[in-house]
Image (spheres, rainbow, N blue to C red):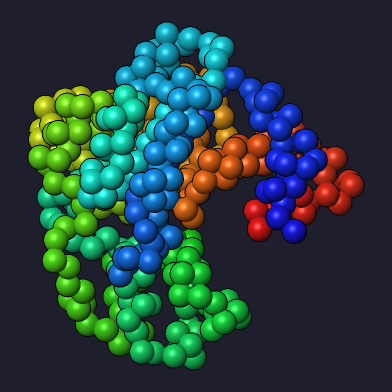
Amino acid sequence: MDYKADLFKYSGLGWLTWKFRPNGLYGFNYHRIGEPDDTQFDPNLFSCSAEQFETHLAFYKRNFDVISSDELIALMRNDTPIKERLAIITFDDGYQDNYQYAYPLLKAAGLPSTFFIATDFIDKPTVPWWDEIAWLLKNTQVDYELLRKWQLPINWPNSSITEQIRMMLRYMKQNHRVSMPQKLAQLRQACGIAENAITVSESLFMDWDMLREVQANGVSIGSQTCSHQILSHLTEQQQAREIVESKRRLEEQLNTTISTFAYPVGGESTYNETTTNLLRKSGYQLAFTFLHNSCNNILENRFELPRFSVDNQCTVDDLKFNICKNMLNQKLSPYVKDNNLSGLYQDK
């Protein structure tokens, strides 16, 4: 049974939920645009194809007032009540396919967006830790038994490589006792692969000239730290370096004021009070999470603005479903629990 089809086409509940969705800010975040089967790295990062992204933009234009980060900052500063449905379109990490595919479509549609950039990947082109993890799992000859010390799930051997990568990344993100460089070194050893074994013909990420071009044509630039490490796993001094230095580098190269920030990984456990205090002291005005919700008080939530993560070759129906599922889980969770209707909201 396709629960998405049931929710929107048959029960009528989805249609009513969508029709009466509240006013507020709806954030939609992307990572990569393209085909996941074409990459030697993490396929889970591909939000959708270029063709799908074009349909998303038309959907946003029909259903929301799409605003820029500068307009959002103005709403925050004036503490303006939100009496309409607003949307902000963002991209994390700064992959080159954002420039190649997303940027021309955004420009053609006349829609603003914000690209959040991890500056180390621009200054020192390299393969980021999550893509290296994916590459290691795709290329290792080591069997399951030798990898068991990573506390892998029982179903690991029977899972697809895409799912194995997702499981390993979840473990690596949650394990805060060891630094990411140390975890990578341990995984390389476990996989039997040397440190510098990965070769790429060109950088995965945009360069400074690309960022200057998109900035001149409707794309705002924000920071996503220097090295994209999970901030709550770092000391205060390490967090300060990631937050302050990335801002300084972007402002120096792009001749602009950097006022927005996106937390790497973005869940509520990936940042802490130290993080938000550092953002405030450093002059940031807004910070974005991956808390799936809408928001109608920007000032109150300015360092925890929610966004819906656009993933898994997402269609327009998926976008609507994710918004409605979140609303239903929040509004009807006691009823769902009491009446054993939880299956209706599962993303199968």
**Left or right: 160 with respect to 118?**
right
Quarter of the image that includes the C terminus: bottom right
Any part of residue 41 in sight: yes
Which picture quadrant has residue 262?
top left
| Residue 66 quadrant | top left
Residue occupying image coordinates x 70% and y 40%: 8
Number of numbered tags placed on the structure image: 0
Q: Residue furthest right?
A: 339
Residue 23 x %, y %: 59, 19
Residue located 42% across and 16% down the image? 76
Q: Position of residue 57 (x, y in %)?
A: 42, 33
Relative vertical location of residue 233 with respect to residue 52 in this rendering, above or below: below
Say which residue appears at 74% left-offset and 29% top-offset. 16
Give the residue drawn at x 36%, y 89%.
141
Name the one closer to the observer, 194 or 19: 19
| Residue 6 on image: x %, y % | 75, 47
Is 251 on the left-hand or right-hand side of 264? left
- Quarter of the image that includes the N terminus: bottom right
Q: Position of residue 198 (x, y in %)?
A: 21, 74
Query: Hey, which quadrant is residue 253 in on the image?
Result: top left
Would you place residue 180 above or below residue 87 in this image?
below
Residue 32 relative to residue 197: left or right: right
Q: Nearer the viewer, residue 128 or 1?
A: 1
Residue 112 visible in image: no
